[in-house]
Amino acid sequence: MSDRPADAARLRAAMTARLTDDGALDDAAWRAAVAAVPRHRFVPGFYLSADEPDELGLPVWEPVTAALDRERWLAGAYSNSTLVTQFDGEEPDWKAPAVRHGGFPTSSATLPSLVIQMWTDAQISDGHTVLEIGTGTGYSTALACERLGAANVTSIDVDAGVLTRAAAALHGVGLQPTVAVADGLYGYWPEAPFDRIVAACSFRTVPSALLAQTRPGGRLLLPLSGWLHGSARTLLTVAEDGTAEGPLLPGTISFMPVRVHAAPPVGNPGDWLADVPSRTRPARHAPERIDAPTEEAFHLRFLAQCAAPNAQLVTLEDRTYLIDVVTGSAAVLVDGPDGWAVREGGPLEPWSRIEDVIDRYDAAGRPGPEEFRLRVSPGGRLLQHPEFPDGLTLP
């Protein structure tokens, strides 16, 4: 089928103008990169959510390709939207794609404004060498190549199928960066050291290998997340001695976790409560403090996660469970006529730990993410704030 390049060029120019008007393309070099890279060449197909779930309540995902609906495909490719391209690590056959019911997204084309924000937040300049973790479709890689030159760009992905398609797309538009199948936890030593490392996936902690592969004075932009689905981003500057320090960045941005850091299944939450003492106490804080759809809860959930890093939150009807599959600890909160009550047990008491963090957060005046700094040293990974004298420890 013909690419009809005039249609794509017109839509690409319109997307570039929209992103510029929205303030996402203040940098002229990145604006030129967005104007040059044909995003549709990197998304032969993607899924869009249907308006209604299926009869089982599962979300329905409709495939979109040029063959199925060319106008919808091109419009999606040049929208400022994240486009899901894979579920559950299973590669779709874009020549004969099927409607999906449920599933967990494992690869996507990140919305262009966020791609640009990540590269911009990493403070990239001419001449820098960069390692991108999470090639995905290759669109973000292509933008970096346009900005820095392909010789300065290395991109890795743990999924060989995803990387093969991205490499073909990059080659198809005349770009040949270094690409490799590799686990982001370990970076890519053959091309190290790098001036910048930028991850397009999230980690539970800061991998030591990435610090070692960052040139002294270089920066590492890393999304962080965990099993409570709390997320943050940090920009670390690496020192000569291999330690690193930097702020959390503002905003409520989240990324898919690296696959080895994904949360394990918890099964039936009731099974975990068999050995939990029956005594209850009034909860000092309701679970809404960390699971409400607000920016503050998003940030507070990340802080709470530092106190209970192996806990997972499950809500069923009027009960909220915290399950720690590593230590066997568990808690259940019940919303009753007198407010929330909690019972918990095991080696750790996860809700008590989270309540302590919420108390300290409130006493500190509810500081935003940008008021915290992360320090990484041989002694560990410590999130620091003046009103948190002992800090909060990452896994």
Image: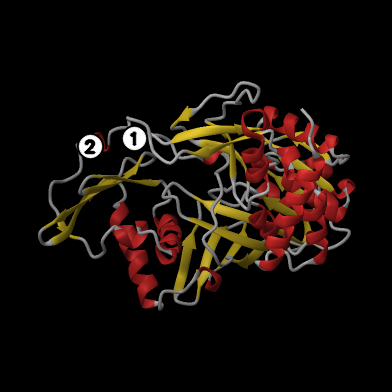
CA–CA distance in space, label 2 to label 1: 23 Å
Question: Does residue 183 appear left or right of residue 346 in this picture?
Answer: right
Amino acid residing under circle 1: Gly
Question: Does residue 154 appear left or right of residue 357 in this picture?
Answer: right
Decide which of 80, 330 is in the foreground and name it: 80
Which residue is drawn at the image coordinates 86% and 41% (left, top)?
Answer: 175
Asked if one can make out residue 213 in the rendered structure from this viewpoint, the answer is: no
Which residue is drawn at the image coordinates 72% and 56% (left, top)?
Answer: 14
Give the numbered dot on residue 270: 2
- Image quarter in which the N terminus is found: top right
Q: Which comes before the other along the chain, label 2 or label 1?
A: 1
| Rendered view: 250 above or below 346 | below
Count of numbered circles in the view? 2
Question: Does residue 230 appear left or right of residue 134 in this picture?
Answer: left
Q: Closer to the camera: disc 2 or disc 1?
A: 1
* Residue hosting label 1: 57
Q: In the rendering, at what x and y percent does residue 240 appear?
A: 77, 62
| Rendered view: 228 above or below 304 | above
Q: In the rendering, at what x and y percent does residue 226 appear?
A: 48, 49
- Disc 2 residue crowd, few under 14, some 14–19, many 20+, Cα 10 Å: few
Decide which of 24, 324 is in the foreground and name it: 24
| Rendered view: 199 above or below 389 | above
Could you say whether the residue bearing mark 2 is in a helix, strand or loop?
helix
- Where is residue 263, by image quadrant? top left
| Rendered view: 247 above or below 71 | below
